[in-house]
Image (cartoon, rainbow, N blue to C red):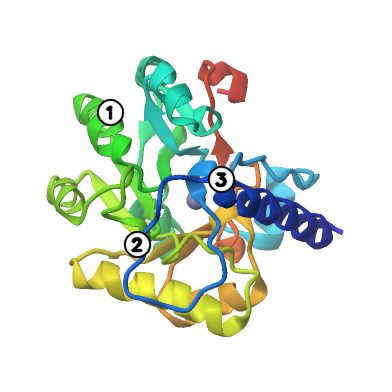
């Protein structure tokens, strides 16, 4: 049932972004050339939160079935920028205003939360090293240029680390990060750049396409000295058994969905939940 609903949602999203592309004036250049069907455009996609109902299992039940588990809210952002500018650029629905963002980090700091690294969650799964009881992870999808201009300077002020999921074929396009900016931020040690496919393709595509999408992004990240540890986020939140197997076989440690939830379990480490954060205080998200 959950799968069917996801397929329907992804279908709708693809239809909507296909229509969006017809009217899009901004051209997206992807390199290297791969023959591809029309690409979904992350910027024009109003991303509804696919809402398969959160697991009815308690933490203890999940821990027993899928554990070890840790309660770690993983905050998911896309654009962080001035909201008027986001509106003018047409991606308001994917944007958290810079003032809200700052307020959310202040809340984390003032309420004793610890921003951990993705590596810390991997260590918990691999070696059982515990994570602080009030841990959170910060993630940013797609690799928009405002991560560098707006989110990153604020993160630096707080000394908070983050993971950015890049669709590597979209880098260097208008509105997206450049490899130079990525390299500078990577050198700071605060940001992990990770795989979000090559062209922001959902992994419900044919197996050969999924391999090429994840594999090309893997190669491009590696060429730029990135992708360690290897983690992944599913474009549009859509996951598939084939993708999970492919990721596991290629050295990936974790994969994040857009399914809501904060209980992170080792046996479910290729379909970890996240919280999509919007323009509100974190108390609205259960903090
Ligand atoms: Zn995305």
Residue at mark 1: 150
Q: Please tell me whether mark 2 sits on a helix, a strand or a loop.
A: helix
**Which residue: 37% across, 55% down?**
166
Task: Read off the residue under disc 2.
Answer: 168
Q: Please, is residue 54 above or below residue 89 in the view?
A: below
Few, some or many residues within 10 Å of mark 2 (<14, 14–19, 20+): many
Contact? badges 1 and 3 (CB < 8 Å): no
Q: Nearer the viewer, mark 1 or mark 3?
A: 3
Q: Quadrant of the C terminus?
A: top right
- Residue situated in front as seen by the camera: 101 or 90: 90
Q: CA distance from mark 1 to mark 3?
A: 28 Å
Q: Nearer the viewer, residue 200 or 22?
A: 22
Above or below — where is 202 with respect to 22?
A: below
Q: Upstream in the sequence, badge 3 or badge 2?
A: 3
Q: CA distance from mark 1 to mark 2?
A: 20 Å
| Dot placed on the residue nearer the N-terminal end, 1 or 2 | 1
Q: Nearer the viewer, residue 190 or 264?
A: 190
């Amino acid at each position: 049932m959950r799968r069917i609903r996801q397929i329907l949602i992804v279908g709708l999203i693809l239809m909507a972004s296909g229509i969006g592309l017809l009217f899009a004036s901004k051209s997206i250049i992807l390199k290297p050339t791969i023959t591809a069907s029309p690409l979904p455009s992350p910027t024009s996609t109003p991303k509804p939160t696919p809402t398969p109902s959160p697991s009815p299992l308690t933490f203890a039940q999940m821990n027993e079935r899928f554990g070890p588990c840790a309660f770690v809210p993983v905050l998911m952002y896309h654009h962080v920028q001035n909201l008027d500018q986001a509106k003018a650029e047409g991606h308001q629905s994917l944007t958290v205003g810079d003032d809200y963002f700052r307020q959310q980090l202040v809340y984390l700091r003032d309420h004793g939360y610890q921003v951990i690294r993705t590596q810390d969650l991997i260590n918990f799964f691999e070696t059982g090293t515990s994570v602080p009881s009030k841990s959170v992870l910060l993630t940013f999808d797609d690799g928009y240029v405002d991560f560098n201009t707006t989110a990153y300077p604020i993160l630096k002020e707080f000394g908070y680390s983050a993971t950015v999921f890049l669709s590597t074929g979209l880098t260097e396009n208008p509105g997206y990060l450049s490899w130079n900016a990525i390299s500078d931020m990577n050198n700071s040690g605060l940001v992990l750049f990770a795989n979000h496919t090559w062209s922001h393709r959902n992994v419900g595509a044919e197996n050969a396409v999924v391999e090429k999408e994840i594999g090309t992004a893997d190669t491009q990240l590696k060429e730029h000295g990135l992708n360690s540890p290897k983690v992944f986020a599913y474009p549009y939140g859509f996951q598939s058994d084939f993708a999970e197997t492919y990721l596991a076989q290629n050295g990936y440690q974790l994969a994040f969905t857009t399914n809501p939830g904060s209980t992170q379990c080792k046996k479910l480490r290729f379909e970890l939940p996240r919280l999509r954060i919007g323009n509100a205080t974190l108390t609205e998200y259960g903090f």
